[in-house]
Every structure is written in C-alpha cells, then in structure tokens.
Image: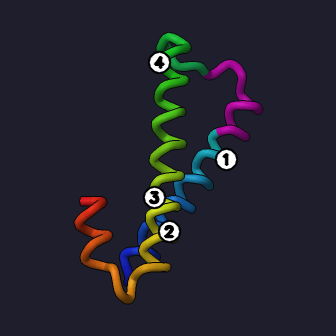
Amino acid sequence: MKLSKVLLAISGTMFVIAVLFFVYALNHPEGFINIPVIGIKRLYLIYVLVMILLFVVSKLLKKYMKNHLTSLLFLFF
C-alpha cells in the first residue's frame, strides 16, 4: 500500500474516533478526566494538528509522488 494511502487512512480513522468521542461525551456528561482544562485543550489541539498534518502530507505525497518522492520524504523525515 502506498504511503499516501496509509496516511490518509490514519487521518480518516483519527477523524472518526474524534467524532465518536464527541458524541459519547455529549451523551455522558458524568464522565470526566481529572486533568486541568488547559491540559485537555492542549491534548485536543495536538490531536487535531496531527490529524490535519497527516491529511495534508497524504495529499502532498499523492500529488508529487511521481517526480518528487525523494525530496518530499527528505523534507518530512
């Protein structure tokens, strides 16, 4: 399987998990994590940024796969 498809699948899975967590959290307000609010917001921000980064990298790899594969891999890794 191509790297771009793997990254796209991972970012899609992360999105589905985030939506399912959101729906669960709305239906179960009694469940909470004993972490300060700023810490939870930072975790959510990191999660969203990683998901967006994987999506963008997968699209870039797909677009430039033919000619620029080695230069893109060098830039990102």
Q: Nearer the viewer, residue 70 or 4?
A: 70
Q: Where does the image place residue 12, in percent across and percent down from the top left?
A: 56, 62
As drawn, is 2 to the left or to the right of 25? Answer: left
Task: Give above or below for 11 relative to 24.
Answer: below
- The magenta stretch is 22-31
Q: Residue furthest right?
A: 27
Q: Residues within 10 Å of mark 2 (few under 14, many from 20)?
A: some
Element type at marker 4? helix
Q: Residues within 10 Å of mark 4 (few under 14, many from 20)?
A: few
Q: Answer with mark 2 or mark 4, whichever residue precedes in sequence.
A: 2
Of tags 2 and 3, the one toward the viewer is 3
Task: Quickly name the residue at label 1.
Answer: 19
Of tags 4 and 1, the one toward the viewer is 4
Q: Where does the image place residue 70, in percent across and percent down from the top left?
A: 25, 77
The colour scheme used to paint the residues is rainbow
Of tags 4 and 3, the one toward the viewer is 3
- In the rendered image, which quarter contains the N terminus? bottom left
Residue flagged by tag 4: what amino acid is it?
A: Gly
Q: Answer with mark 1 or mark 3, whichever residue precedes in sequence.
A: 1
Q: Answer with mark 4 or mark 1, whichever residue precedes in sequence.
A: 1
Task: Quickly name the residue at label 3.
Answer: 54
